[in-house]
Amino acid sequence: CVHLAALIDLVRFMFYPPRCDDDDDDDASCPIDEEVAKLLELKAQLGGDDGKHQFVLKTAKGTRDYNPKQMAIREKVFNTIIGCFKRHGAETIDTPVFELKETLTGKYGEDSKLIYDLKDQGGELLSLRYDLTVPFARYLAMNKITNIKRYHIAKVYRRDNPAMTRGRYREFYQCDFDIAGQYDAMIPDAECLKIVHEILSELDLGDFRIKVNDRRILDGMFAVCGVPDDKFRTICSTVDKLDKMPWEDVKKEMVNEKGLSEEAADQIGEYVSMQGGMDLAERLLQDQKMCQSKLACAGLSDIKLLFSYLQLFQVTDKVRHAVVFDLSLARGLDYYTGIIYEAVLTQAGVAPVTAEAQNGAPGEESVSVGSVAGGGRYDGLVGMFDPKGRKVPCVGVSIGIERVFSIMEQKAEASAEKVRTTEVQVMVASAQKNLLEEKLKLITELWNAGIKAEVMYKKNPKLLSQLQHCEESGIPLVAILGEQELKDGVVKLRVVATREEGTRTSTEGVCVCVCVQFSL
Amino acid sequence: CVHLAALIDLVRFMFYPPRCDDDDDDDASCPIDEEVAKLLELKAQLGGDDGKHQFVLKTAKGTRDYNPKQMAIREKVFNTIIGCFKRHGAETIDTPVFELKETLTGKYGEDSKLIYDLKDQGGELLSLRYDLTVPFARYLAMNKITNIKRYHIAKVYRRDNPAMTRGRYREFYQCDFDIAGQYDAMIPDAECLKIVHEILSELDLGDFRIKVNDRRILDGMFAVCGVPDDKFRTICSTVDKLDKMPWEDVKKEMVNEKGLSEEAADQIGEYVSMQGGMDLAERLLQDQKMCQSKLACAGLSDIKLLFSYLQLFQVTDKVRHAVVFDLSLARGLDYYTGIIYEAVLTQAGVAPVTAEAQNGAPGEESVSVGSVAGGGRYDGLVGMFDPKGRKVPCVGVSIGIERVFSIMEQKAEASAEKVRTTEVQVMVASAQKNLLEEKLKLITELWNAGIKAEVMYKKNPKLLSQLQHCEESGIPLVAILGEQELKDGVVKLRVVATREEGTRTSTEGVCVCVCVQFSL
């Protein structure tokens, strides 16, 4: 039998063994029957029990609540991502969820129709942020910051057609990392790819491919293939569809809808089928047609430089995590000016399982979860906000975290290991009635010592229901107060998982139960 | 001279010494000149350099960006609060930033005019959340949850008159902890107060007082003083002003504006001047008039029970952190049904310094920062959302975190200790030109080993500028590569704070510099 201080030490020891380890996720059963919850939610959405209630009990279209289990997964994913951003020396900032409407105007092209506006209730006209990049640029210009490496994790809003089973929502998180400043070519750009590589590897999402291209190579290619200057952006948008459509359909759109000559389209077709590494960049630098464009040459030289840095950063494992120079990568947003990239998961089976598991039917939903990260260089955006048009070169990456959540949730569901939603270390329980006062005194000592502890909010709970709560919540230890123990001035500490009845004179070798001297 | 693995071990050792300690806040200089930033921000808000730019470069009225220094403080405060919530076994949930407009309708009384609506762009009518309590109740009803202990930290929105120097914004954080479920009286209620006590003590904000009352005592008191039933809520609102107005003015409002008899007002005046502890509750239970109201008696018995639990929880330190039964506490919101409480900072000097430091002028702004936490029991709110009106009893507390931020920021500014905005442990630097490749190789090894490291994004930075960056950012270690070191196959590890030039044969006793064998 030991003193109260020893009880505290003992609980601490079990959670923080000498080798420092912060991760105390134990396997334990989960308190929420997810299936039942889902059905209940569906029922509530369909109109409740008997249609008696007056209002619709639901969240807004395209949005969702996160339950405690989803939050536990979310916290784990965020910790991985924030850990990586911090390892690379990033600071963090936050901006308001809404901006002046004019701040967002003219930044998103066609997608502007997806911006949520606030009602005019007098005062300024406001809109919900559409991404974190434009508020970042506004922040830099407003505070005249020319150098910063920052991350920003926050929700953004798009009035898009939600496809929630595929992780597409109207309210969703973005995890952005950006480097602003006038630096030597491709060093920050390469670090952004290193970060994508680290995060996707650490999250253990399976094989992935990082596609890389450069807007200058695309524009140069369009020029040498005979695309008129004013059609660069619209042809670029069509090229962007190559990951969803076969070349023949893309070509048709170029020729029939965008009015490009068949000859020009065919020349583009040849280039955009090319994929490779540094060797491809070298070959294209020798390409008679391509090298007519100074812009393309600058882009190709930078791709070469980028690959040399990626080699030093050890991110060119060609088998499971390939980095590919892919001339068909175009990306949607207008503001990119240099290197662009996108990471896709390539492991067969990940996505179809996803869709089927969620709606029970394969088919149209069974497409790949696709891009899980993307970004590029945007050297002109900050200048759009600066009164004198002063530019601040920027490069950044955004992690498509909702898709990652979807995958992690399915993994958790498929896994035998249950997700804990609290971190409680010890439950203060009683074996007999009328011990509330003693329990509250003991738990106060534990809380004051920084130990995560719980007690039931009942005067006289049954011992069985206290132990059941431990098993449901995965609480590993239970401190049991009983009349005999109080007379003896001790408290039993029991390991829940073993389910063995502890005795003070246990001789089983394993530490099932410890008695702690405790004066109230 | 030691191996690369030893360099990694060494850096780790310096950050994680054998006694496990997660907190690596070092004192070091800060990279941002706050004063300059403030002036620049002001200038930007006033219209920039010469009014040439077309748009207003600002955040929406009543909102603000958080810069990296503010974020570092915010993270620290959140960690304290989340740590406390987790210690008490709370799960966490998240809800969307906007709700269906009808979900918020009829919950906030007069304050409903402060709700932000979204523009009708087709589809559902939406509003930004006004607090976290109503979405919580909606979540419970929608998912038919009858038992949960959860915390929720998120931004809420109110079209209020901002007073930003006093920490009053239109977009601000709430940190809510609530216990839902049918339990024995006052146990969860007492835990909420224990949590307020723990958080305010840990944040070290100085002395505070927690005022406690009960809506049933107020209503019972109004009844026995002769207030007509239909005037309970409006008279309650007037009582709520007692912390800002003298009794004479409150009485005038009751009599002249609300039409109460002078006699009734005087009787109320006697009661609301009462403050005490368990003894006051006992005295009032004997009070001839008060004990005519069963409602008041139930409330007074519960106050007694509450104080007995608070004693067990060790939160009744009468000197610095008093808990006071205060009959003048009324609180604004309609939905409270039982115990109510509010914590105020009482240390003289905190608030006036705040206002003066921020706008240079005392006067009207020099009021107390006032309430930093508040809450109570609301047993009817969930039932408002349930189709069959099933009630789920709830009690909770909300930490007024923006005021805490304001105080912490001023403390940080006043303190000599600088706030670090990154956690970088080691800077990889070079003493000569053309060592970029070697630096990138070394930093890759460090990142892959989980060490937080930075390198400058320049091919040939000056050693001085690399060291200056360390001092500005508070980076404690610098690993220096030089030609001689590369020839010798070593790298210097220098402690930035000592500024001493390390040599391999140093005999000064202190570990200024370590040479690490490193093959590239």
Image: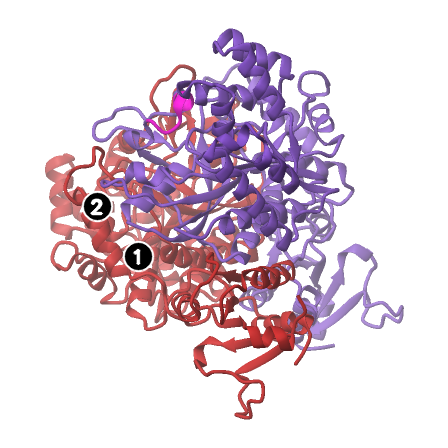
Chain colours: A purple, B red
Relative to A490, A376 lies left or right: left
Which span is picked out in magenta? A106-112
Residue positioned most to the right: A508
Measure the C-alpha gap from mark 2 to mark 1.
Answer: 22 Å
Where is residue A236 drawn, in percent x and y?
50, 23
- Comparing B243 with B419, the one in front is B419
Specify the label residue B104 is tagged with: none
Q: Quadrant of residue B215?
A: top left
Chain to which the residue tagged by mark 2 belongs:
B
What residue did someone put label 2 on?
A: B44
Give whichever of discs 2 and 1 has the lower sequence position.
2
Q: Is residue B484 left or right of residue B206?
A: right
Residue at the far top in the pictured view? A256
Q: Quadrant of the C terminus of chain A?
A: bottom right
Front one among A407 and A452: A407
Residue under the image location 48 percent in, 33 percent down: A215
Q: Which mark is residue B406?
A: 1
> Hey, which quadrant is residue A348 in on the image?
top right
Q: Which quarter of the figure is the N terminus of chain A placed in?
A: bottom right
